[in-house]
Amino acid sequence: MIAFGFRLLLAVACLALAQAAAPLRPASAADLETTKAAIQRSLDVQYPRIEALYKDIHAHPELGFQETRTAARLAAEMRALGFEVTESVGRTGIVALYRNGPGPTVMVRTELDALPLLEKTGLPYASTFKQLLRGVETPVMHACGHDIHMAAWVAAAKVLIDMKDEWSGTLMFIGQPAEEGGGGARAMLADGLFTRFPKPDYGFALHVGPAPYGYVSYRSGVVNSTADGFSITFTGKGGHGSRPHTTVDPVMMAARFIVDVQSVVSLEKDANRFGVVTVGAVQAGNAGNVIPDTATVRGTIRSHDEPTRARLIEGVERTARAVATMAGAGEPEIRISGSAKAVVNDATLAQRSGAVLKRAFGDNARQMRLPSSASEDYSEFVAAGVPSFYFGIGGLDPKQMAEASAKKIPIPGNHSPEFAPIPEPTIRTGVQAMTLVVLEVLRKN
Ligand SMILES: [Zn+2]
Ligand SMILES: [Zn+2]
C-alpha cells in the first residue's frame, strides 16, 4: 500500500511535469519531483525487461566464484547499454565503465552470488538449480536478494544513460562474486580493481532486507557487523558405541564446545556491545552405534567493533582447546576464515545521500538507530579507501508483514529458503534510491 501511494505520487508528478527540463540539484521540492519523474519514465519503459531479467537470474542462481552464467548475462546487458565491460576480474567478477565527460568516478556494486539452499518459496520462477559445493551437488537459491540487486543495478545504469545529458563523470558498475562466503571483494581488489580501472571517488551499494517495500534505510558510520567464519575439528579416537570407555568421543567435544562457547558471549563480552557466536553446521559420524574419529563444527562470529571481535575470536579458540584438553584429546584444528570488517559509511557522503533520500522518500526513508548484525565484504572497498554509502531497501509486502506481526508469526527474511521479495516495488525503490544518490554526486553544476 505504501509503495503504491508512492508510485501514484510519481505518476501524477510525471504527468504534470512531462518533458519539462530536469535540473539535478534539488533546489526545490518541484525540482526533485522532476528528477524523480524522469527516473520513473525511464524505468517504466524498461521495467518488463528488467523483471524478465530478475526472474531469469532468480531461476539460475550460482554459488560464489561459479557465477559464470550470471556474469555473462550482466556483461551482455551492460555492453548493450554502451558500457565498456571487462569480465573475469577477481575470477568471475565484472567491471563496466561508462565515461561521460569530466567529473568523479562513481562505483555502484552488486553481488553476483547465491546460497546453497533448497528454495521453498513455491514461486513460479523458483530455482531448481544445483551446483557443486566442496564436491557435493547442492541446491542453490538466491535467498539473500542479490538477484534484486542485479536487476536494480542494470536498471539504474539504463536510467543514468537515459539521463546522461544531466550529469558528468564516469560510472563504474561492478558485479562482485562470492559475497556470501567472503573473498569476492578481495579477489577483485587483488586482480587490480583500483589499478587496472579508475579508483572511484565514491562507492554505492544497496541491500534488500525484511522490511516493507517502498522503504529505504541508512546510517552514517558503522552500518553492519564484522564477520569471521570458524571451522573447528576435534579429533578423538573412534570405536564401538557400546564401549565408549575405549574411545575419545569427538561428538561429546563438539557438543560441549557448542554449549560452553556461549559463555564467552554472555560473560566475557561487554554486555553493552553487540557480539554473537553462532554454530550453523556440525558434521560427525554417520551411524548411531559408532563413535567417529572426528567432529567438525562451523560457525560465525559477529561484532560491531575490533576489541569485541578480538575477544570473541580468542574466546572461541580458547574454549575449543579447553574442551579438547578436558576430553584428553590432542589439539583441535582451528581455522578462522572468510573474515569481513564492518562496513563504515563516509560521514559526509552519508549526510548528503541521506538528505536526498529523505527528501525523495519522506517518512519511507529511515535512519537506522543501530548497525545491523549482518555483514558484508563491501567493507573491503571501504578499507581500500573508497568513501561509500551502503544502504538498505525493504522487499516484503507491508500488508503481509502487518498480518504476520499481528499473529506473531516470523516472516521469512534473508537466508531463509522462503525469502521472497516482491519484485516490482522492491526493484523500483532500489532504482529510484540508487539513481538519486548517484546523480547527487555527479550532477552538473
Ligand atoms: Zn547473504
Ligand atoms: Zn547479501
Image (tube, grey):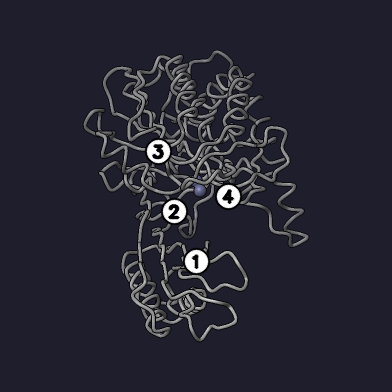
Where is residue 128 shown, x and y percent of the image? 64, 37
Tell me the kind of residue under disc 4: Asn
| Residue behind label 4 places its C-beta within 8 angstroms of ligand 1 | yes
Which label's residue is closer to the chain start, 4 or 2?
2
Location of the N terminus by quadrant is top right
Decide if residue 46 is on the left or right side of residue 344: right
Measured in 3D between alpha carbons, the distance from the residue under mark 3 to the one under mark 4, in whole angstroms, is 20 Å
Q: Amino acid at mark 1?
A: Thr
User: What residue is shown with label 3?
Assistant: 204
Residue found at x 46% / y 70%: 293
Q: Secondary structure at mark 1?
A: strand
Q: Which mark is residue 375?
A: 2
Which residue bears the numbered disc 1? 278
Q: Where is mark 4, residue-wise?
A: 414
- Local packing at callout 2 (Cα closer than 10 Å; few below 14, some 14-19, many 20+) is many
Marks 1 and 3: CB-CB under 8 Å? no
Residue 403 coordinates in the image, percent (x, y):
77, 53
Q: Is residue 317 visible?
A: yes
The first of marks 4 and 1 along the sequence is 1
Q: Nearer the viewer, mark 4 or mark 1?
A: 1
Residue at left offset 74%, top offset 62%:
408
Callout 3 amino acid = Phe
State the SS at label 2: loop
